[in-house]
Amino acid sequence: MTEGPIETGPRPPEGLRVIGAADVTATIEGNREGALDAVRAAYLAHADGASSNPHSSFLRFPDRPRDRIIALPAFLDDGAAPRSGIKWIASYPGNVAHGFPRASATMVLNDYDTGYPYALLEASIVSATRTAASAVLGAQELLGERRAGKVGFVGTGLISDHVRMFLRDLSWQVGEFALFDTDRGNAERFAGVLAADGPDAPVTVVDDVAGAFAGADLVVVATVAGTPHLTDPALLADAPVVLHISLRDFAPELVLTATNVTDDVDHAVRERTSLHLAEQQVGHREFVHGTIADVVRGDLAREPGKPALFSPFGMGVLDVAIGGWVYDEVAARGGGQLIGDFFAL
Ligand SMILES: NC(=O)c1ccc[n+]([C@@H]2O[C@H](COP(=O)([O-])OP(=O)(O)OC[C@H]3O[C@@H](n4cnc5c(N)ncnc54)[C@H](O)[C@@H]3O)[C@@H](O)[C@H]2O)c1
């Protein structure tokens, strides 16, 4: 009998497919409903244990305290396909002053059977998309409909812009918008883009943060605050649903008045998030009522008359869900660039 390579069973991928921003954007812009579905399926699979989502790992620098690069590895089996990979995302807030975005990212997807990487994607758009999709999923589940009389935005940067595109493309009915940003010029630019979206919801740039909350059914908080600056309980007096995407804005006292929903309690109650500060103050986590998967399944509802705070930590399973979905779409049409001789085989 001759010995040789085994010819059946798993084989390495045909190469490494590199997918740039244009292909990623085209896929997502054509189908934000599909992105929302992928995020919902990922949350449910994660809640069922069909995932592995280690804590993210932060690379920091001794002499660049504002900057960081974060690694988020994850595995997810949402029933469509087993997906594994890693997002490697840099946050350099100083970039913005030089005219280009704070965050840049790549994602590697690995073959489930052989471990071989088969795709390298531009991932800042994947990342912003999964963040906005998860927030807007939280909004529709907590409000029970795709409708809000007034939507407030606190922080009108890139992530808020992706939330805006989801609200638009998922045909939300919004009565009016109120925008607050510590950089008024950013809010004014955002107002222009919102107005161009149409149809005709009035858009107001407000002078203080209270104006974004007053009478709002839904408030999107996406700033770059590292410590709580929302400290007045009156902000939540009208019991809005708040998408607390930037995680560190609310003082613990306000957190404790709300129905608190997150994506994964172990992930979100750490790293000095508002949930973490609240835990440190009261010595337990019972004020976190559950996860977005609980809300989607109907096992957790918002308490009438109380504000609801959705604080999604942002999980790697969402990145591989969106990245994998984008890959499938792009590869099916032969897009990206396939490097056939990438591996040492
Ligand atoms: N939870 C998640 O999954 C997740 C994922 C991605 C990003 N984020 C977070 O979302 C936040 C926003 O990211 P981005 O890319 O939109 O940033 P960005 O820099 O594009 O925009 C942030 C905006 O917030 C404004 N701002 C800063 N402090 C403010 C304050 N106190 N009040 C009002 N406005 C203020 C800035 O002027 C800017 O316009 C960041 O904190 C980021 O870490 C969270």
Image (tube, rainbow, N blue to C red):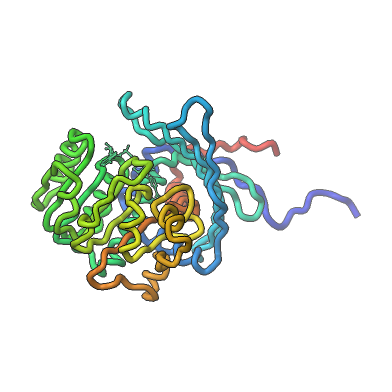
Observer-nearest residue: 230 or 99?
230
- Residue 26, horizontal then vertical, whole percent: 34, 44
Quadrant holding the C terminus: top right
**Residue 200 located left or right of residue 69:** left
**Residue 210 located left or right of residue 251:** left
- Residue 319, horizontal then vertical, whole percent: 46, 50
- Residue 326, horizontal then vertical, whole percent: 43, 50
Observer-nearest residue: 13 or 265?
265
Q: Write the residue at 35% across / 50% down.
A: 245
Residue extending farthest right: 1
The count of marks equals 0
Observer-nearest residue: 248 or 256?
256
Q: Is residue 55 at all visible to an observer of this figure?
A: yes
Q: Is residue 19 at all visible to an observer of this figure?
A: no
Q: Write the residue at 40% across / 68% down.
A: 289
**Residue 20 located left or right of residue 307:** right
Q: Write the residue at 46% across / 35% down.
A: 90
In the picture shown, does residue 172 fall above or below 195?
Answer: below
Q: Write the residue at 68% across / 55% down.
A: 10
- Residue 273, horizontal then vertical, whole percent: 42, 50
Image region (quadrant) for ligand 1:
top left
| Quarter of image, res 75 | bottom right
| Quarter of image, res 190 | top left
Quadrant holding the N terminus: bottom right
